[in-house]
Structure formats: structure tokens, C-alpha cells
Amino acid sequence: MTQRVALVTGAMGGLGTAICQAFAKDGYKVVAAYHPQFDNKDEWLKEMAAAGFKDFACVAGDVSNIDDCKKMVADAEAAAGPVDILVNNAGITRDRFFAKMDKDQWDAVISTNLTSLFNMTKQVAAKMAERGWGRVINIASVNGVKGQAGQTNYSAAKAGVIGFSKALAQEVATKGVTVNAIAPGYVATKMVMAIREDVLKGIIDSIPMKRLAKPEEIGALCSYLASEPAGYMTGATLNINGGLHFQ
Ligand code: CAA
């Protein structure tokens, strides 16, 4: 069997890095998609090489911009071949109580966290279906499942990610393509560490396991969803949150 190709957006963040590494260990060709404004690409590649991951291809673009997404997928195909596994992982927060949230904060989160799924998946889903095999893995959030004060924008986008996954899963179910959402709880990444210290302490206290998730715990779940034995799982939302919320 030829080596599968995995494209991961937001690849150079905490979660994205763990997903890329999990896929590399599984033997896939990994294409790391990153935002062109991220200026630590070379440093990231050096860190990866030092950790034994020498073969990551990189493509740059803004997932909220459909033309960038067309180019990123074309670049990924040129570098590695047709995309078999897409992980829509790129995401941002603009936390603010709704009373104070402005339209820019709403739009930024909806376009980066939700419209991006249209933009990226559109470039690969039909081709996966034609080839009769594919995996789309969408990173949602516990806060898309339960809602979170201060995150009307993010909770709405992540709930949308779950709805998108369930709908597309049905459309491609007979084509060998699965579409699933992972809803992580609070993971030890820069995004979560940016939460005000007192607020974060309160969040950790409310998690039954009393700790944040390790990025590699989410990477392992992506690894499973991309695997052959996961072929019968589709339209699922997999909660991985230390007991913070049960659906
Ligand atoms: N529910 C209801 N009221 C709340 C509340 C809550 N959860 N949290 C705080 N409040 C109240 C406070 O008690 C306070 O009331 P008083 O003024 O009467 O004392 C008032 O709201 C203001 O609270 P803050 O001081 O926190 O307000 P702020 O403007 O400084 O900060 C905020 C607002 C930025 C939303 C901040 O509360 C925050 O960061 N909250 C955390 C949101 C969160 O969980 N984000 C997750 C980010 S990580 C992520 O998203 C990854 C993932 O997928 C999980």
C-alpha cells in the first residue's frame, strides 16, 4: 500500500505538533499547514528534526481564506501526493463576555474555526470519495458541546464543527470516507495558558482529573481515527476532557 498523506492545519501549535508527530510515527507523509504570519517555521522544523521528525513538508496559508486553502492543498499534493487524511485543527480564541464582544471578535472566530472547514474540506472531500478512502478529522471542543461563558463565538463555531462533521459524514458514508469530530477539554497549549491565571486555576479545579490534557493524548485519538480499524466510525464526536463534561 502506498504511504498515506496527512494534511494538518494549525500544525505548528501545541495540538497540531502532537498530531503531526503521531501521524509521522504511524508512517504517514505529513504536511504541516501553518499561517503565513507565524514566523517561527524554521525554528519549529529544527525542533522537529531534533526530536527525530525530519520529513515534514510545509504549506502556508490562512484557513479562513478559500483561495489560500486551494493553494495549500495544491502545494500539499505537489509535495506529497493526494491528501488522504485532513485534520482541521487550526483555531483561535477571542474570549469576551457577549455584552462586550465586538463583531470583529465574532467574525474572526467563526471564519477561522468554522468557515475554514468548508474552505479546506471542499478541496479534498470529492477526491477522497473518488479514490474510495479518506479521513476528515475536525477538532471541536468541550466548549462547543457544553457552551462556555466568555466564548459565545468559540462555542458557536465549535458546535458548528460538530454539526458539519455529522452532516458530511452521511454524505460520504458509502465512499470509504469518514468524518469525525474530536472535542478536547482544556489541553496544555499556549491557547489555554493564555487564560488569566485565576480563571485557569478555577477551570482546572472543575476538571474531575484535576489536570489539563497532554497534547499527545489528543494526537493518539487522531491516530486512531485515521487508522484502518476506525473505518466504521463516522459522524462521531469523541469527548476527551478528563471528565469535565459528559454528553
Ligand atoms: N459564568 C458566569 N459569570 C462569570 C463566569 C462564568 N463562567 N466567569 C466570570 N463570571 C463573572 C465574574 O464573577 C465577574 O462578576 P463580577 O463582576 O460580578 O465580579 C464578571 O463575570 C467578570 O469576570 P472576569 O473578571 O473574568 O471578566 P473579564 O472581562 O476580565 O474576563 C473572560 C472575561 C475573558 C471571558 C474571562 O472570564 C475568561 O478568560 N474566561 C475563560 C473562558 C474560557 O474558558 N476560555 C477557554 C479558552 S481555551 C479554549 O477555548 C480551548 C478549548 O477548546 C477548551
Image: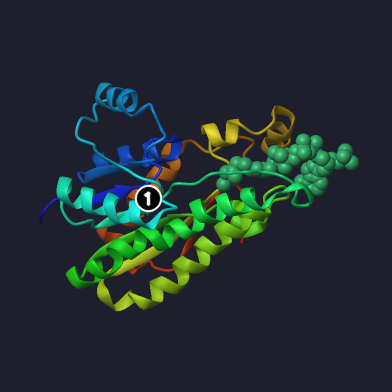
Q: Residue 87 appears at what percent x and percent y?
A: 36, 52
Which residue is at the far right? 99
Residue at point 36%, 42% (across, down)? 19
Residue at point 43%, 36% (across, down)? 13
- Residue 245 seen in this snapshot: no
Q: Residue 172 appears at what percent x and percent y?
A: 33, 74
Element at label 1: helix
* Image-based side of 144 in relation to 222, left or right: right
Q: Which residue is denoted by mark 1 in the rendering?
A: 222
Q: Residue 73 appears at what percent x and percent y?
A: 26, 53
* Image-based side of 196 in relation to 168, left or right: right
Q: Quadrant of ligand 1?
A: top right
Q: Residue 133 appears at what percent x and percent y?
A: 22, 66
Residue at point 26%, 75% (across, down)? 175
Ligand 1 within 8 angstroms of badge 1 C-beta: no
Residue at point 41%, 38% (across, down)? 216
Q: Name the amino acid, label 1.
A: Cys
Q: Nearer the viewer, residue 100 or 147?
A: 100
Q: Nearer the viewer, residue 29 or 25?
A: 29
Q: Give the quarter of the figure containing the C terminus.
A: bottom right
- Residue 141 seen in this snapshot: yes
* Image-based side of 109 in relation to 28, left or right: right
Q: Nearer the viewer, residue 60 or 226?
A: 60
Crowdedness of circle 1 by 10 Å Cα count: few (<14), some, many (20+)? many
Is 109 situated above or below 128?
A: above
